[in-house]
Image (cartoon, helix red, strand yellow):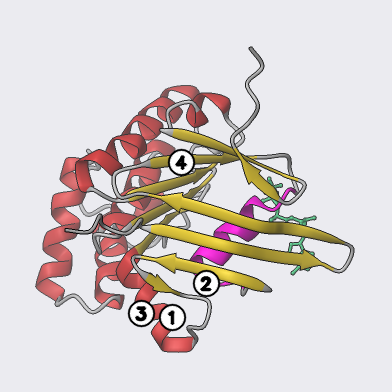
Amino acid sequence: MSAPESAVAVDSLSYALPDRALLDDITLRVSYGESVAVTGASGSGKSTLLMCLLGLTTPHTGTVRIAGRDIVPMRGRALARHRRAHVGMVFQFGELLAELTPSENVALAGLLAGLPRREAYARAGRLLAELGVPADGSPTAHLSGGERQRTAVARALVNEPALLLADEPTGALDSVNREAVADLLFSLPKQRRCALLVVTHDASVAARADRTLLLEAGRLEAPVSAS
Ligand SMILES: Nc1ncnc2c1ncn2[C@@H]1O[C@H](COP(=O)(O)OP(=O)(O)OP(=O)(O)O)[C@@H](O)[C@H]1O
């Protein structure tokens, strides 16, 4: 039997700004069950790389295979469908709809991906209970920062993605919640057999990943150890 393909397989990915190469011939593999942290100076292109993985930025060259399919040639509905089915995203500030309940926020992502209503709400309830978010029907606006981020994680998981992307997921949290959310995120690849790619400036968050890569001068490579 052949080995399962990586959740993420990027080859020869390049993206240039008018004055410089932002992503220069990048290769990246993230396996199912594996976590990778991407670090790099502000402006080095980390968000642009995430945008390429989401299909929201089209690279100038290269292939971006997510869950076995190259998304670079995909457009419109086919791209959106593939992304909703296979990719979950956690943003720095949660990006939840404040007036909806956590359950509605999570179920909505399932409904948009085509889950039947009952299934979307059942999954939302299960995930929120597992992740320790109160289900008392209060709007998301009433949650603490940590609870909001756990709701955002539940939303990212509702469609059982192959790939979980997180952009500074702990950047807006205090130290206690930062630890709790980081623990939660990095437990997911092994528990759910998804790949996790986290962009972070926080060395203590990056240290939890199976591998850390540094984006510098367009190249994505393992950082040279200081020791
Ligand atoms: N479409 C675009 N047109 C022009 N410049 C762009 C475009 N997209 C990104 N940039 C520039 O590319 C550089 C990299 O931006 P990007 O947001 O990817 O960096 P980053 O590493 O995520 O930074 P940060 O850590 O501050 O979030 C920045 O200088 C940004 O201004």
Residue that carries the numbered disc 2 in the rendered image = 55
In the image, 77: left or right of 202? Answer: left
Task: Give the mark nearest the N terminus, 4 or 1.
Answer: 4
Question: CA gap, disc 4 to disc 1?
Answer: 24 Å
Element at badge 2? loop
Disc 1: CA contacts within 10 A as few (<14), some (14-19) or many (>=20): some
Going by the numbered disc 1, the residue's amino acid type is Leu
Q: Residue furthest front?
A: 1
User: Magenta stretch?
Assistant: 44-57
| Residue at the (69%, 53%) spot, across then down | 45
Instruction: Name the chief secondary structure element in magenta.
Output: helix
Q: Callout 2: 10 Å neighbours few (<14), some, many (20+)? A: many
Q: Which residue in the structure is indicated by mark 4?
A: 36
Foreground of the two, 68 or 208 = 68
Q: Is residue 174 visible?
A: no
Report if the beta carbon of the residue with label 4 is closer than 8 angstroms to ligand 1.
no
Q: Residue 3: horizontal and vertical position, in percent?
A: 25, 55
Reading the image, the residue beneath label 3 is 81
Which numbered disc, 1 or 2, marks the residue that appears first in the sequence? Answer: 2
Instruction: Please tell me which of labels 3 and 4 falls first in the chain.
Output: 4
Residue 64 visible in this rendered orientation of the protein: yes
